Amino acid sequence: AQKVTQTQTSISVMEKTTVTMDCVYETRDSSYFLFWYKQTASGEIVFLIRQDSYKKENATEGHYSLNFQKPKSSIGLIITATQIEDSAVYFCAMRDMDSNYQLIWGSGTKLIIKP
Amino acid sequence: ETAVFQTPNYHVTQVGNEVSFNCKQTLGHDTMYWYKQDSKKLLKIMFSYNNKQLIVNETVPRRFSPQSSDKAHLNLRIKSVEPEDSAVYLCASSPGTGRDTQYFGPGTRLLVL
């Protein structure tokens, strides 16, 4: 069965540093899509970045990048030069054919950026 | 810029009542979704609609039913609410399925007394 696991419940870092959030997934499909979303304190959920399983290059988007380690079924999110407004809950999610293309979500990691 | 709209923002009701939540998207997307987010922030898909056809129907209680008049609207009705239905209900849309990004509404918080 498909599963997405985020073991870090909360991370706290100083502003302007780099942070990595972990995510591991389980799938039997050879083709799948991995997503990271952010939920702000207001409850708004915003898409950040996506990795397609067939792509070897790590996706990047602004100050977000991914560390995709396919043999380890791992997709870490890296945020460089963190800002106060990056404080939020970050969700990892996966979509594959087995799940009928519905998103399977991790439990989220709360990121706190300290000034 | 908000493109997925939900009403109401917040609703308080008594056990056994019927409630209905509305969702509209102005993105021209073909697929819409309803999620339930519990107090621990866990997100669970409830329903998704593609061109007015139900394509995913999780094993949610029968008192929940999605209602769609067109591809831009997907409402959620709860026939007889129970205390465990207290949660945030999030509507989302995407161009299609597969690799497509989902865009979320602000959510409707339901409190069942």
Image (cartoon, coloured by chain):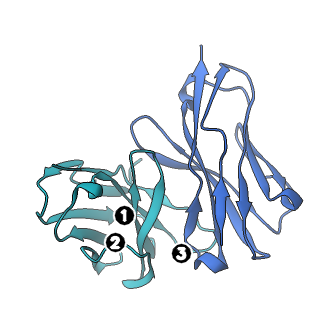
Chain that appears cyan: B
Residue annotated with mark 3 = B96
The residue closer to the viewer here, B97 or A70, is A70
| Residue B74: image location, x then y, percent | 31, 71
* Left or right side of A86 for B51: left
Q: Which mark is residue B72?
A: 2
Task: Single out the residue that lies furthest toward the bottom.
Answer: B53
Please report, as a chain letter, where disc 2 is located: B
| Residue A8: image location, x then y, percent | 66, 39
Instruction: Determine the CA span between mark 2 and mark 1.
Output: 7 Å
Count of marks placed on residues: 3
Lower position in the chain sequence, tag 3 or tag 2: 2
Residue A50, placed above or below residue B30: above
Chain that appears blue: A
Q: What amino acid is at disc 3?
A: Gly
Q: Secondary structure at mark 3?
A: loop
